[in-house]
Structure formats: structure tokens, C-alpha cells
């Protein structure tokens, strides 16, 4: 086990993994369960204000990833992460006083600002030799954290809103404390370059990775479209109770977590990441298509498990492939820009999904999302392997 740990993960990535888990646990608990319930029942806010607050969180998180990457290339990891988590803690601390809508929105937005550095730092810490494997590990941490947060929060909310809040506040404080033990150096050996020259390098990278751009935006767009309609779709179309819907989510999440590291290792071993992308996208679309047919409970559970496994196939290879286009001397800035591009779909997806559901119904949103994923897979299957390997090698 010690040999395995030394081979796959260094001490730094393990520390940041612990911080990532706590941050995503609190994020999942806050956004999916605590903020909607606390905002409506305790603070007396309307659902549209709560929706705006959640959107504000994702907007600031996504928009600031580029700036965080720029800072990580110039300041120590400890300074950026510690300062970011302090802002995140301030957002949680503001919630009991957020009786005014604008303050509630600001609190959610501040939490989005604070967690921006964590994922970027984790991405810059993985090694080239085991990149897909380590990506799988990080995504496992992320999924377990963001998935378990709402479950714990929902259980606690049945007994005490105050206890739930203090749990989130206490975990945020502990996470901020852990950041004191992070490295006090820059995220990489940065070659000093003017800002204009750095963006010129990144613009060149984006030009060479144009074949990947549709997948970067559309995969998060398709997922974002499903966010506002999934609970009502499960209840009204699939005939599920709340407990059964929780099992559906658990099935998808469990198979994703189980599959991430094995699929990451397989991707490292076999190479040819293009086909992991093609199969992952197409299988996700096929599983969503099956759910849109409104199958019975056991088939829905099986499809959710297959969907999770398809997601596990896609994610490690996708991020390992993106890593080929990150400038070695501007890793923080590069990952920040790529994460921002991917986040565009996640920001606009819920709005599009909500509008489509109001016009055509929830099932139509699932159909459109399924078609989008299949089209992405088919788009990439027409390009030879060299389109993915040579374009990266030309700009190293």
C-alpha cells in the first residue's frame, strides 16, 4: 500500500485531496439542500432569489478560475488557497444575517469565489506519468464529497437547521486551517513572461485544440440542462418517491466512483484517449435516451449505474487529453482558462433546460441532452488519432 501511495500520490496531492473533499462536501450540502431550504423556510426568501443566488455561486466560481490560475503562477499556493478559503468562510458566516435578498446572493457568490483555487491547484499537482489515474482519484474525491454533502445535510435538516449550519461552518473553518499546511511556494517554476505574451501562448493552444472545444462546452451544457428538471422528472415521469430518487442518484454516483480509478489506469495503459471520449459520450447519450423512455424502477436504476460508468470512462481521459495543451510554465493560468471554458456550459445549461421544460416538458430536456452527447461522440469519431496527438505536440 505504501509503495502504491508513493507511486500514485505524493503528500501534497493527498493534502489537497482532503481539502477538496471538505470543500465539495460543503458545496454539495449548501447548494443542493441547505440554501434552498434555509433560504425559503428560515429567511423567507422567494425561490427566484434562491435560484439567482445559486447561479451567482457558479458564475463567480467559473469566471474567477482564470484569475485564480494567473495568481497561482505568481504567488505561493498557501497564500492563494488560504485567502480563497477565508473568502469562502466569510460567505458561509454571512448566511444567518442574509435576510435581505442581495446579501443572500452575495453570500453564495462569495463561497464561489473562495473555492475557485482548489481544483486548479489539484490539476497542477498531478504527474504526467500517472495523469489519468490521478485524475480518476481526484474525481472520486470530488464526487464522493459533493454527493455525500446533500445526503448528510438532508438528514440533519430533518432534526435541526442550526446544527446543519454549524456543521458547514465548522467544516469551512477546519478546511481553512488545513490550508496552513500547504506549500509556501509557487505552483510551478514560472518563467516570467509579460501578460500579453502569456495570453498569446494560450491563444495558440486554444487554436490547436479547436477539435476539443465543442466537447468542452457542450458536455457541461448537457449536464446543466438536466439540473433544474431531474427531481420533477423522476417524480412525475418515472413515478419515483423521494427515497427512490435518492437511490437513483446513489446508483449513478457509486458506479462513477467505482469506475474512475480503473478507467483512469486503463487509459494510462492503453493510450488512445480519443476512443475513451467517443465511447464515454455515446454511452452517456444512450443511457439518457433510455431514461427518456420512462422505464420502470429497476431499469432506471440500471441505466443510472451505466450512466455513471460511462461518465467514469470519459472524465480521466478527457482531462488527461486537455493537459497536453496546458503551457508548462503557466499551468495555473492554463487550467484556469480551460476550466472557465468548460464552465460556460454549466452556467447557461440550467437556464436552457428550464425554458425547454416549460415549453416542451421535462422529457424533452432529457431527449435533447441525450442527443447532444451522442452528437459530441459522433463528432470526434470522424477525426483520426493524429488530430489529437499531433496538435498537442506542435505546441509543446
Image (cartoon, grey):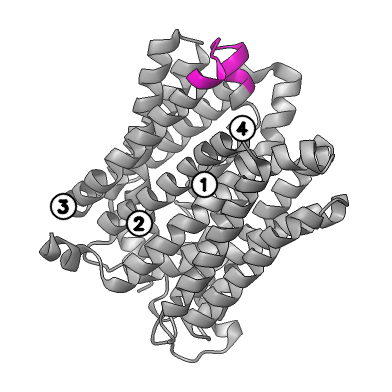
**Callouts 3 and 1 close, C-beta under 8 Å:** no
The residues colored magenta run 232-244
The percent position of residue 192, horizontal first and vertical second, equals 49, 92
Q: Which mark is residue 321?
A: 2
- Which one is in front in this view, the residue at disc 4 or the one at disc 1? 4
Q: CA distance from mark 4 to mark 3?
A: 47 Å
* Image location of residue 91, percent across then percent down: 70, 61
User: How far apart are the two marked residues, 2 and 3, measured between alpha carbons?
Assistant: 14 Å
Mark toward the viewer: 1 or 2? 2
For disc 3, the neighbor class at 10 Å (few under 14, some 14 to 19, many from 20) is few
Query: How far apart are the two marked residues, 3 and 1, measured between alpha carbons?
Result: 26 Å
Give the residue pinned by disc 1: 214
Q: For the residues carrying marks 4 and 3, which lies nearer the camera in this image?
A: 4
Along the line of sight, which residue is nearer the eye, 379 or 282? 282
Q: Of helix, strand and loop, which one carries label 4?
A: loop
Tell me if residue 91 can be seen: yes
**Residues at badges 4 and 3 in contact (C-beta under 8 Å)?**
no
Q: Is residue 235 magenta?
A: yes
- 35 left or right of 323 in image: right
Of tags 3 and 1, the one toward the viewer is: 3
Label drawn at residue 158: 4
* Horizontal and vertical percent position of residue 229: 64, 26
Secondary element under disc 1, as helix, strand or loop, is helix
Question: Percent from the top left, x then y, of residue 72?
Answer: 51, 78
Amino acid at each position: 500500500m505504501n509503495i502504491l501511495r508513493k507511486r500514485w500520490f505524493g503528500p501534497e496531492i493527498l493534502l489537497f485531496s482532503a481539502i477538496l473533499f471538505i470543500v465539495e462536501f460543503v458545496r454539495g450540502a449548501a447548494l443542493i439542500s441547505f440554501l434552498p431550504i434555509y433560504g425559503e423556510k428560515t429567511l423567507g426568501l422567494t425561490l427566484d432569489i434562491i435560484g439567482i443566488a445559486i447561479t451567482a455561486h457558479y458564475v463567480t466560481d467559473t469566471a474567477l478560475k482564470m484569475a485564480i490560475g494567473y495568481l497561482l503562477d505568481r504567488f505561493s499556493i498557501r497564500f492563494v488557497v488560504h485567502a480563497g478559503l477565508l473568502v469562502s468562510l466569510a460567505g458561509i458566516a454571512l448566511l444567518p444575517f442574509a435576510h435581505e435578498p442581495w446579501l443572500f446572493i452575495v453570500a453564495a457568490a462569495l463561497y464561489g469565489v473562495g473555492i475557485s483555487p482548489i481544483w486548479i491547484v489539484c490539476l497542477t499537482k498531478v504527474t504526467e506519468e500517472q495523469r489519468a489515474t490521478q485524475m480518476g482519484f481526484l474525481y472520486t474525491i470530488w464526487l464522493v464529497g459533493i454527493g455525500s454533502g446533500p445526503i448528510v445535510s438532508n438528514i440533519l435538516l430533518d432534526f435541526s437547521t442550526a446544527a446543519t449550519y454549524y456543521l458547514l461552518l465548522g467544516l469551512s473553518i477546519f478546511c481553512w486551517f488545513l490550508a496552513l499546511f500547504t506549500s509556501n511556494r509557487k505552483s510551478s517554476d514560472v518563467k516570467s513572461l509579460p501578460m500579453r505574451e502569456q495570453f498569446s501562448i494560450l491563444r495558440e493552444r486554444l487554436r490547436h485544440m479547436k477539435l476539443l472545444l465543442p466537447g468542452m462546452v457542450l458536455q457541461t451544457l448537457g449536464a446543466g440542462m438536466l439540473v433544474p428538471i431531474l427531481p420533477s422528472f423522476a417524480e412525475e415521469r418515472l413515478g419515483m418517491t423521494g427515497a427512490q430518487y435518492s437511490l437513483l442518484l446513489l446508483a449513478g454516483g457509486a458506479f462513477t466512483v467505482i469506475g474512475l480509478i480503473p478507467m483512469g489506469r486503463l487509459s494510462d495503459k492503453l493510450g488512445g484517449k480519443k476512443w475513451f471520449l467517443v465511447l464515454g459520450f455515446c454511452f452517456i447519450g444512450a443511457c439518457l435516451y433510455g431514461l427518456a423512455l420512462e422505464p420502470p424502477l429497476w431499469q432506471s436504476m440500471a441505466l443510472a449505474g451505466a450512466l455513471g460508468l460511462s461518465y467514469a470512462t470519459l472524465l480521466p481521459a478527457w482531462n488527461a487529453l486537455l493537459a497536453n495543451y496546458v503551457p508548462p510554465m503557466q499551468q495555473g493560468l492554463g487550467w484556469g482558462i480551460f476550466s472557465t471554458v468548460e464552465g460556460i456550459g454549466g452556467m447557461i445549461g440550467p437556464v436552457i433546460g428550464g425554458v425547454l421544460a416549460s415549453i416542451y416538458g421535462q422529457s424533452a430536456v432529457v431527449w435533447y441532452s441525450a442527443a447532444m452527447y451522442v452528437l459530441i461522440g459522433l463528432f470526434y469519431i470522424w477525426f483520426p488519432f493524429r488530430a489529437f496527438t499531433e496538435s498537442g505536440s506542435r505546441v509543446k
